[in-house]
Amino acid sequence: MKAPGLSVVLSSLVAAAALVPVVVLLFMGLGAEIAPSGRMAAVAANSLALTGLTVIGATLIGVPLAFLTAHTELPGRRLWTGLLAAPLAVPSYLGAFAYFAAFGTGGELHELTGLPFPSVDGLVGAAVVLSLYTYPFVLLATAAALRNLDAGTLEVARTLGMPLRQALWRVILPRVKNSVAAGALLVALYTLSDFGTPAILQVDTFTRIIYVEYNAFGLERAALLSIALLGLVAVVLFLESRVGSVREAPGRPPRLALSARGRAIALAGILLVLAGALGVPLGIFGLWLAREGLTGFDPAILLNSASASLLAAVGAVAAALPVAYAATTGRLGRLLERAAYVGFGVPGIVLGTALVVIGLNAGFLYQTLALLVLAYVLRFLPLAVGNIRAPLERAESGLVGAARSLGATPREAFRRVTLPLILPGVLAGAALVFLEAMRELPATLLLRPTGFDTLATHLWRVYEAGYLGQGAVPGLLLVAVSGGAVWVMLNGERRGLGPL
């Protein structure tokens, strides 16, 4: 860290480590026996259909809610805005687990009421569940754009005789369509990468079939499927990079009055969404906790999750420091930073498959805690880099130079100027990596040492064994952990620690 040259060398090593899994998959995929075209086509069709249905569902939920929270005089608007963003704090596999247990013949709702409830298995059910946990991407992106609009354009359209509904459709929506598209692409990326929801709800997407092939010792076929999935993810990332927000001079945002009937309908819709996204999992896990208590939960599982996640947080910060510093020194450093971000765009199941191959070829790593921690570091490194880079840029832009001009040595300038400025970002990045690692499922399933259970994998084992009631404690703990992750994220954004 004393000189840019050292930071670039260290960043090169980090970038190479991030790229190695992708290279390994490419070599493995080249030697794989190509699956029957019909099966590959069916898996691709399921993945694309689930993604498309989820994008439609999330958009149909997120856009109206964005209008309600940004442009109307809804009672308790700020409270509803926060609550409607809360489903981001619940991993979709938790929702899928709760819906799987609640619905269908013999489900908890059937047992409680005696009424028949449809099963949520299959493509449509998975799309509904994923829509409930991804709509905040669309909601937040659209609401942010709506708040920057000026009421003058809408008022002119109304003055010229255009009905409100038509004015919203023809005047307001076109000005925020890029933000809607950006949120929808994030939904698509999340859906393509998600493993838990399609696996629990029995939809043969790429992520589920990769795991099936891994369990059947078909690593080469798993690698080939991983490459196909990476191709779809790359297309979504490219489209996302091409979508830019429309910049407007901020003005007085529109405020639309709601009739008594309109308020009732709006509040009923909000409560229905929140009941589906938050009420069902919290209700099911709470019911199980009241019924079965702590039965079947070993506190060592929480210790395993915490210890592995803590090691990942320390490792991610150690790797992020030279990457963030190199990114402030020039074009090469920024290029290396981009390379280090590869892990964040690689689905967990794909990264896990690649690291399994590496572990098998380097026997001392296979099924070790070190390999699992490495997966967490590569996967969540950008969270640490993003939190450290912004305050580091502020420090390097002038304050360090001023300290040096006053006679401070490089080490003293770092200790007295740079370190105090970046410390909040370091701590926020470490906390966010810790919390995200705690709830990571697919990579943990593939890479954990034998007998090493985390909260996420214990919940998965409970699902596979059919002892669903024992999922109460890990489920509620994961909800708490996820809430902590969102709190750290929002707190970091308020303090201006950089993109998370």
Image: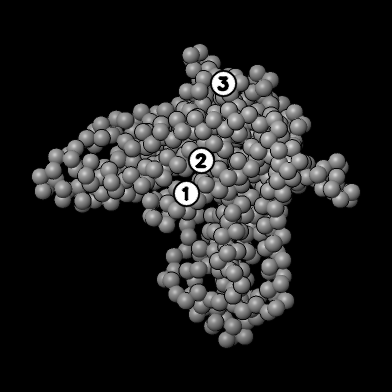
Residue 225 visible within the image:
no
Label 3 to label 1: alpha-carbon separation = 29 Å
Dot 2: within a 10 Å radius of its alpha carbon, few (fewer than 14), some, or many (20 or more) residues? many
Which of the 4 quarters of the picture holds residue 158? bottom right
Q: Residue at x 58, y 50 (%)?
A: 88
- Residue pushed farthest top? 363
Label 2 to label 3: alpha-carbon separation = 20 Å
The amino acid on which the numbered mark 1 sits, given as a three-letter code, is Val
Q: Residue at x 40, y 28 (%)?
A: 16
Q: Is residue 104 above or below residue 23?
A: below
Residue nearer the viewer, 355 or 368: 368
Which of the 4 quarters of the picture holds residue 325? top left
Q: Mark 3 = which residue?
A: 449
Discs 2, 3 touching: Cβ within 8 Å: no
Dot 1: within a 10 Å radius of its alpha carbon, few (fewer than 14), some, or many (20 or more) residues? some
Label 1: which secondary element:
helix
- The answer to which of marks 2 and 3 sits earlier in the sequence is 2
- The answer to which of marks 3 and 1 sits earlier in the sequence is 3
Q: Position of residue 296 (x, y in %)?
A: 69, 30
Q: Which mark is residue 435?
A: 2
Residue nearer the viewer, 143 or 15: 143
Discs 3, 1 touching: Cβ within 8 Å: no
Discs 1, 2 touching: Cβ within 8 Å: yes
Q: Position of residue 429 (x, y in %)?
A: 42, 43
Label 2: which secondary element:
helix
Residue 285 visible within the image:
yes
Give the tally of numbered discs.
3
Q: Mark 1 = which residue?
A: 488
Q: Residue at x 60, y 64 (%)?
A: 80
Q: Position of residue 78 (x, y in %)?
A: 55, 66
